[in-house]
Image (cartoon, rainbow, N blue to C red):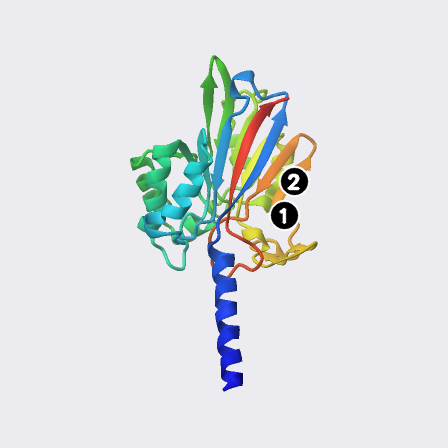
Amino acid sequence: MKKLLKLIIFIVVVYIFLYVNNNWLVTTEYVHESDKIPASFDGFKITQVTDLHDASFGENQSRLVGKVRATNPDAIFITGDLVDSRRYDLENSLQAVRQFVEIADVYYVIGNHEVALNLTDEIYAALIEIGVHVLPNEALLLESNGEQIVIAGIEDPLMGQDVEQSIDQAMQNINKDLFTILLSHRPEQFEAYVKKDIDLVMTGHAHGGQIRVPFIGGLVAPSQGMMPKYSAGIFEEQQTKMVVNRGLGNSLFPYRILNLPEIYVIQLNKK
């Protein structure tokens, strides 16, 4: 009887541990300072959401939406894998996005899972219909008081174009002297972003390394394998800084361990 009770307690503790690790949403804040940021965009706040993978956070995504709304963003960026190729449920993810567009302007780039489904046109159309700015190798100018910054987005390399080509296509008619934010799914392409002199890059894909070990970091990430270099946090080389968001959902491996679902809040400050 005692052995059975211990087993039950163990199972309950493990269940609670896994539930918390996969459902407790956290917000990470980062202030990006640059002398290229115009005065009109000083304090501009961006909330980044990535790798939802059709996960659910409350009825009608209420907990996720509430967390995003509480950040009071000027813009919301979605950096791929909104859906999962193994359990495709676009409507489940759109429940969140429909509410995001009521909070702020929303900008989106695809991830590898959207491409793997071969449904990019359908997903783009659904997002555009509800008011999302879709950026398939395109860039937009945001203007305030006559000053501008660039929001660019690239498609996933699975679409058949390498990252440098995609950046060139997106930026072909853009003033390269303007402060530029790039939305891209993949952090392992960091050297390409550096080569193209991008100021700030927002990525996901790595799922925080799935299992995180204190003082070591993530253990495994898509496209990077074991002990990934770019699993979470801020990376800097030359003039380029890259945000690697741990994301929200899971794909092949169903659990996060010591790796809470994350949204990122990035505030732009003029240096």
Position of 159 relative to 104 (above/below): below
Quadrant occupied by the C terminus: top right
Q: Amino acid at mark 1?
A: Tyr
Residue 167 appears in the figure: no
**Disc number for residue 235:** 2
The residue under label 1 is 230
Residue at the extreme bottom: 1
Label 2, label 1: how far apart the Cα atoms are: 8 Å
Q: Residue at x 58, y 40 (%)?
A: 243
The 10 Å Cα crowd at callout 2, few under 14, some 14 to 19, many 20 or more, is some
The one nearer the camera, 253 or 128, is: 253
Q: Are marks 2 and 1 in contact (CB under 8 Å)?
A: yes
Q: Amino acid at mark 2?
A: Phe
Position of 121 relative to 173 (above/below): below
Tag 2, which secondary structure?
strand
Question: In the image, residue 218 lies at what x, y percent?
Answer: 62, 55
Residue at the extreme left: 129
The 10 Å Cα crowd at callout 1, few under 14, some 14 to 19, many 20 or more, is many
Question: In the image, residue 175 lies at what x, y percent?
Answer: 54, 20
Decide if residue 120 is on the left or right side of residue 207: left
Decide if residue 50 is on the left or right side of residue 195: left
Position of 181 relative to 61 (above/below): above
Q: Residue at x 34, y 54 (%)?
A: 89
